[in-house]
Amino acid sequence: MSPELARAESLIASIPDYPQSGILFRDIMPLLADARALRATTEALIEPFAGSFDVVAGIEARGFILAGAAAIAAGVGFAPIRKAGKLPRPAAAVDYALEYGTATVEMHDDLPAGTRILLIDDVLATGGTLAAGREIVKSLGYTVAGIAVLFEIDGLGGRDVIGELHTVFRSA
């Protein structure tokens, strides 16, 4: 790991019992507030996929921030995958389970069929959110060019659900 990435990782705070008891929340806001850390992690997120995607899709909410930065860095567009009820004209919806509840994501169908999408989220835990993101992208006729996350929590089964993905940081 480069010194810049090691520094960026040190900025991720661990918050116990948030949003509910037993959950260890990874707060990436200090990393996002640091320009050098944000640049280093953005570059690390997209590097393995250089030239293989047309659009970056980010999952609400923190995935938006990373995907937006990644889209700008790569010189491509951005597509949001939103929580239910947030889009004025959703084309598709997918329900999924979280480690602490259930949720639904929605997405527009504004892109040409076959658009190659790099799917980005902040944290991989149980894999439900990213699996829903992958499913909605495919259901709209787009191609998943890759999946990348800033932080993977080992031991929660997310990698088993998602399969092949790129992770910048990992933790037990």
Image: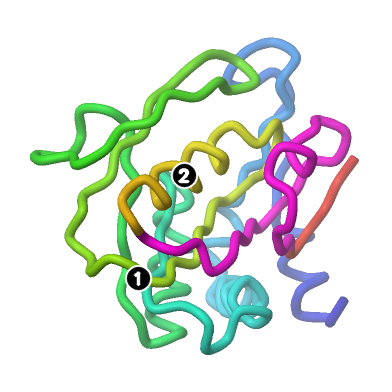
As for residue 113 lying within the magenta part, the answer is no
Left or right of 17, for residue 157? right
Q: Which colour scheme appears in the figure?
A: rainbow
Q: Which residues are magenta?
A: 142-167
Mark 2 surroundings: few (<14), some (14-19) or many (≥20) residues within 10 A: many
Mark 1 surroundings: few (<14), some (14-19) or many (≥20) residues within 10 A: some
Q: How far apart, in angstroms, are the residues tagged by discs 1 and 2?
A: 15 Å
Left or right of 172, for residue 80? left
Residue 116's place in the image compared with 26, above or below, is below
Quarter residue 22 falls in = top right
Left or right of 88, for residue 102? right
| Residue topped by disc 2 | 133
**Mark toward the start of the polypeptide (1 vs 2):** 1
| Residue topped by disc 1 | 115
Find residue 95 and name its label. none
At horizontal 59% and vertical 55% (from top left) the residue drawn is 30
Q: Secondary structure at mark 1?
A: loop
Which amino acid lies under the numbered mark 1 shown in the image of this protein? Thr
